[in-house]
Image (cartoon, rainbow, N blue to C red):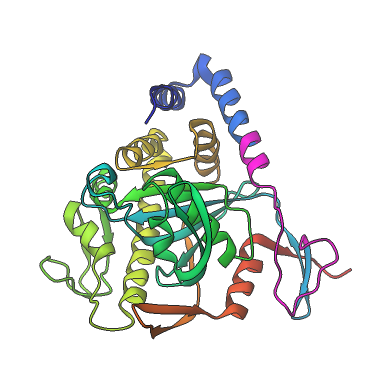
């Protein structure tokens, strides 16, 4: 991470925990973040389902007898987990995005929704050789990360693919985390307690027996899958969603007493990954989380059907269900007059 970004994060941390004479400086940074997020979240080229009707380029939509209006207060962050055992400079391989989800944050209400997207989801992906764009091909979402430098251009490619899946909803921010960072993030909030959905080999994790996950076992819980059967990615995604709900609940509970907890998580994430979410944008979102709080996290997984393809599992989305999810998350029903 560049030195100025590190300095900015330290400044935010100091401002959050000291208050007093620094309140004005914090407000300035938060306002900068709010302005940047509003500008980045403007919709462009919204797509609609074939059986939906719109007269204003998707900002207002009528679908299944209900009218919806696009919620301009939503900011979306694509969170991706990649598994890379060695640096790109050594292997020459960017890796794949083994976990992909969208965090949709309502800056007006402080509400947060998470959309889980299977790594096996079939989508049109931009292909490049070096910096040269050579077209698109239909493939697993996970592979979109491999068409890039393993850092910013790889993440941008995932973001574009995710936006296509979600009818071109604006996806301007990303957080990319090496799976090896799960343990440190987990331990930064004192471990995560949950009731496992499955028994994980070579760990003490037993299905149905409540446990507090630490370090390596937290990573294994969200990463492990039995590739011998077709639905393994879906089972893993269910564990990832459960873990995310428990993690957010415990992190936000800790942040109520100490807002600097969120800054610490941000710093830890940057040690094991990268993001285009700047310090001011993060400060703005963190301030909203602290202000509104959150008792639970709503996680939705895009519905679809897995099948065995020529080379790998292909997850075909249920488009009607996906579009309804888009409307539920990014739009607001318009009350009848």
Residue 294 visible in the shown view: no
Is 300 located above or below residue 284 in the figure? Answer: below
Span highlighted in magenta in the image: 35-59
Is 21 located above or below residue 289 in the figure? Answer: above
Determine the main secondary structure of the stretch shown in magenta: loop
Residue 154 located left or right of residue 34: left
Residue at left offset 52%, top offset 53%: 133
- The outermost residue toward the right is 337
Percent across and percent down for residue 142 are 39, 64
Residue 200 located left or right of residue 192: left
Query: Can you tell which quarter of the image residue 247 is in?
Result: bottom left
Query: Can you tell which quarter of the image residue 101 is in?
Result: bottom left
Percent across and percent down for residue 169 are 63, 58
Query: Can you tell which quarter of the image residue 264 is in?
Result: top left
Q: Nearer the viewer, residue 276 or 109?
A: 276
Residue 53 located left or right of residue 18: right
Q: Is residue 54 in the magenta section?
A: yes
Q: Nearer the viewer, residue 31 or 138?
A: 138
Residue at left offset 48%, top offset 48%: 174
Q: Nearer the viewer, residue 266 or 175?
A: 175
State the count of labels: 0
Q: Is residue 125 in the magenta section?
A: no
């Amino acid at each position: 991470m560049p030195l100025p970004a590190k300095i900015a994060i330290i400044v935010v941390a100091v401002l959050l925990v000291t208050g007093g004479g620094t309140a004005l400086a914090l407000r300035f940074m938060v306002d900068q973040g709010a302005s940047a997020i509003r500008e980045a979240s403007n919709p462009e080229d919204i797509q609609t389902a074939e059986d939906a009707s719109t007269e204003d380029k998707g900002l207002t939509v009528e679908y299944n007898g209900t009218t919806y209006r696009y919620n301009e207060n939503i900011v979306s962050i694509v969170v991706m987990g990649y598994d890379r055992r060695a640096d790109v400079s050594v292997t020459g391989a960017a890796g794949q995005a083994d976990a992909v989800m969208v965090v949709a944050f309502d800056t007006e209400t402080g509400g947060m929704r998470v959309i889980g997207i299977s790594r096996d989801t079939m989508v049109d992906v931009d292909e490049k050789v070096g910096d040269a764009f050579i077209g698109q091909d239909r493939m697993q979402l996970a592979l979109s990360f491999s068409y890039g430098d393993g850092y910013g251009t790889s993440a941008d490619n995932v973001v574009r693919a995710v936006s296509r899946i979600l009818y071109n909803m604006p996806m301007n921010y990303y957080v990319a985390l090496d799976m090896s960072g799960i343990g440190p993030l987990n331990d930064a909030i004192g471990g995560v307690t949950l009731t496992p959905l499955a028994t994980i080999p070579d760990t003490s994790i037993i299905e149905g027996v409540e446990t507090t996950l630490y370090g390596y076992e937290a990573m294994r819980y969200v990463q492990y899958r039995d590739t011998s059967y077709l639905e393994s990615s879906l089972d893993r995604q269910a564990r990832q969603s459960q873990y995310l709900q428990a993690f957010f609940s415990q992190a936000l509970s800790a942040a109520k007493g100490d807002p600097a907890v969120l800054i610490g998580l941000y710093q830890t994430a940057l040690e094991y990954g990268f993001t285009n979410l700047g310090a001011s944008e993060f400060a703005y979102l963190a301030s909203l989380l602290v202000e509104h709080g959150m008792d639970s996290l709503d996680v939705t997984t895009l519905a679809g059907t897995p099948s065995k393809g020529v080379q790998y599992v292909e997850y075909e989305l249920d488009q009607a269900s996906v579009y309804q999810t888009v409307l539920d998350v990014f739009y607001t029903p318009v009350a009848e007059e």
